[in-house]
Each structure stands twice: as C-alpha cells, then as structure tokens.
Amino acid sequence: MAHAILSPSSIHRIIRCPYSAKPNAEAPSTSSLPAAKGTAIHEMCETLLKDRLEGINLSDYYLGKTIELEGYSFEITKDDIFTVEVYVDYIKNRTEELNGKLLIEEKVYANEIHDDLWGTADAVILGENNRMVVADLKSGAWPVNVILNEQLMSYAIACLSRYGNENTVLELTVVQPNKRAFHKDGFIRTWDIQAIDLIDWAENILKPACDEAMGDKPNAHAGDWCKFCVLKQNNTCETYKTYSGGNDE
Ligand code: SF4
C-alpha cells in the first residue's frame, strides 16, 4: 500500500527535520517482526470490530495460529489476544457511552494543511455533544504518550475538517495494552484538545513544517527523532554526523 510523504506516523520527525520527509518516503519499504505482528494485531482488531468472526471466540479462532506476513512467520500468543481484547472492548464501550458512530481503519486526508498529509486512523468515534474520539492502537513495547501526540493530532485535524466544527472537542486516545510498555497512566491514555487549539497548532506548527518539507530547500535538524530515519541508518546524513547528541550504539 502506498504511504503518504507526510505520513502522520512520521510527522513528529518531519516537524523537527523537514528535510527527512522525502528521503524516508522514497526509501524502499522494510518491515520487522514487531511491525509485522502489529499489522496482524490491527487486522484482528478490525475483524473483531466488524463482527466477522461469525460467533467464533477470538482465542478459538486465532490463538496459536501461525501467521505469514511481510516476510515473517509468527504465532498468535495470549498476549496478542489480550491486546486485541482490551482495544476492542474499549472502542466498543466508548462508542456506546458517546452514543456515537464508529469508523474503523478510516482513511483521513488533511488537505487544508497539505495534499501529501494523509493516513489511516485506527478508530474514530463521532460522539454526541460534539465530542470526537481519535484512537490509535500501539502494540509495541515502547510507551507512547498521548499528550501533544503529533501523530494523533494530525489524524484529528483531518477528521475535524471532515466531521467536526469549531466547537468540537477531540478526545485523543492511545491504547497500548503491552505489559512491557509500562506507563504510569495505564494501558489507555486520553487527552482532550479543543478544535480551536488544534487548528492553532496545525496552522502555526504543522503547516509550515509540511510546506518546508515539500519545498525546494527543507532544512535538516538532528535530535532524538533521528533514531528511525533512513539517513541515519545508512549513515548518509551530514547533519547527523555532526550532531553531538548522536549515539551510534
Ligand atoms: S538523520 Fe536526523 S538530521 Fe538527518 S535527515 Fe534524518 S532526521 Fe534529519
């Protein structure tokens, strides 16, 4: 599947280093065992949320099953089942609480910010009282914060322009039921942001970075965000080579 040049999953890095957007988007796509497992877990969630198991219990259907995906082969474990169940239960319950409409694996486009900024939000709930939930399932072991989470904020600005208005409250949500990804706020973290504040961030931080990234002379800035940049990995970034905070472990 094609990926956006300004992918929300990379936007934290792109905001800080606009130069990194194009080379990373043009690099051959690679996977890893955790990434392949993450894809499988997302597919299981979608299957369960869309009631496609036809009455078969999730464990009965998936536990111990060998999955071949993205060049890797692995078994679905109890922990994987747990991750799916926590996420699906939360999304279903929150949809009911908000008397909302649930959109699953929703393609969202932030054209007002830039035509190349788009992605797939794991779940969007259009709730009553002008509340919109934008949720992201994280299956990895690296704990992810929800406050000022720029990936979720990018999905949210795209959702806002399509489904919301200036009075919408966006409830950003990270669900990360990985027992190795300890976070003081638990498996499920939420953070509210008002539409007006999200728009302010999008116009003053996100849009200038996107315009620079897609322009003729984007600047490079090194920092913690270099970690997964392809130019750091192939040792071809001159800016990173002079970065004193770099740690080529
Ligand atoms: S290695 Fe760092 S400084 Fe260089 S392009 Fe990538 S993100 Fe930017």
Image (cartoon, helix red, strand yellow):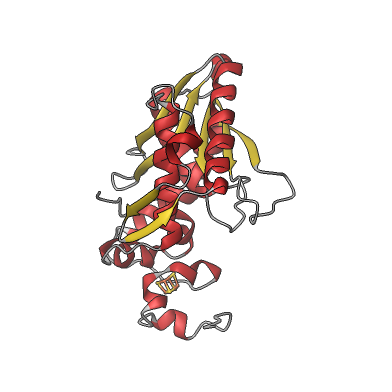
Residue 193: quadrant of the picture: top right
**Residue 19 rendering spot, x and y as whole percentages:** 37, 67
Quarter residue 113 falls in: top left
Looking at the image, which residue is at 48% across and 48% down?
A: 151
Q: Is residue 167 left or right of residue 108?
A: right
Coordinates of residue 223 in the picture (x, y in percent): 53, 71
Q: Which residue is depicted at the point 52% across and 83% down?
A: 248
Quadrant of the drawing holding the C terminus:
bottom right
Above or below residue 204? Residue 218 is: below
Can the viewer see residue 6 in this picture?
no
The quadrant of the rendered image in which ligand 1 is seen is bottom left
Q: Nearer the viewer, residue 89 or 56?
A: 56
Q: Nearer the viewer, residue 5 or 205?
A: 5
Side (left or right) of 119 relative to 243? left
Residue 58 vs residue 216, the one in the foreground: 58
Q: How far across and down, in percent of the image, does residue 144 sit?
A: 59, 52
